[in-house]
Structures are given as structure tokens and as C-alpha cells.
Image (tube, grey):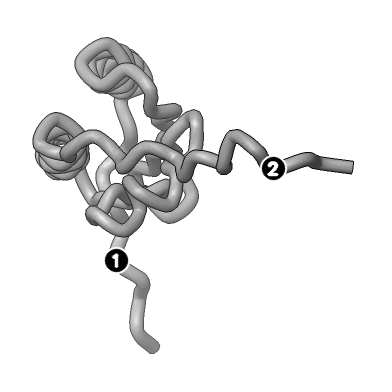
Amino acid sequence: MITPRRLPPIDPGLLAEQLLALTQAHPGWRISYDSGIRVWNALRSPLPNAWEAKAGVKYMIQAASPERMGEKLTEQAEILKNLPAPPPPPQFPRGLLLP
């Protein structure tokens, strides 16, 4: 019979510190940790618009460690920082009558 590998226990104090640090460093993301499967999750709020999504901005990110989550969120911030302004909406002709 194979005995399942036991993971080391989670330190709640350290987890809270890591969560707070990530949340403060990356505003606009709701960050959480799933202790059942031991994965970090981040959801972007508000969701990316079509222009941002086309550029590679994600609405959800998962990572195995807080360090990797920080790296992924920093990559997302770089995409947003370098994103050109969206094109202006089309103008309606001035003489167009709408019902």
C-alpha cells in the first residue's frame, strides 16, 4: 500500500502576511489562497475589457507560490502599463436622426 505524501503544515501567520503583501503590491486584484489544493488565486476587478484581453491581460491567475503569484501579477501590470490607448469610438454623422 502506498502512503500519500504529507505536505508540511501551513503557518496561518505567514500566510496572512504573504496575502497582505500581495494585495498591497497589486491593487485591482482579489487574491486568495486555497489551502485544500494549495494554490494561490487572483481575480482581476474589474474584469479586463476586450482591448485589454486582446493584449494579454488575464481575468484570473493561479500560481503555486506567493513568489510566483507576485511575478505573474507584475507581468500583468507591465502589460497594462504598456497598453496603448484604445481607439476612440466611431462618430455618428451630425445629420443623422435617431428615432
Q: Answer yes or no: is residue 34 visible.
A: no
Q: Quadrant of the C terminus?
A: top right
Q: Position of residue 10 (x, y in %)?
A: 33, 33
Q: Name which residue lies at 42% across and 36% down.
A: 44
Q: Say the numbered circle drawn on residue 96.
A: 2
Give the farthest residue toward the bottom. 1
Q: Is residue 58 above or below residue 91?
A: below
Give SS at disc 1.
loop
Q: Is residue 33 above or below residue 4?
A: above
Query: Horizontal placement of 56 versus 30: left or right?
Result: left
Comparing labels 2 and 1, the label whose residue is closer to the camera: 2
**Which residue is the site of mark 1?**
5
Q: Position of residue 7 (x, y in %)?
A: 28, 52
Q: Quadrant of the N terminus?
A: bottom left
Give whichever of 52, 68 is nearer the camera.
Answer: 52
Give whichever of 37, 46 is nearer the camera.
Answer: 46
Kind of residue at disc 2:
Leu
Kind of residue at disc 1:
Arg
Give SS at disc 2.
loop
Q: Position of residue 84 (x, y in %)?
A: 17, 38
> Which tag, 2 or 1, sits closer to the chain's start?
1
Give whichever of 68, 88 is nearer the camera.
Answer: 88
Q: Is residue 91 above or below residue 13?
A: below
Q: Say the numbered circle drawn on residue 75.
A: none
Q: Name which residue lies at 44% across and 28% down.
A: 30
Q: Name which residue lies at 36% across and 71% down.
A: 4
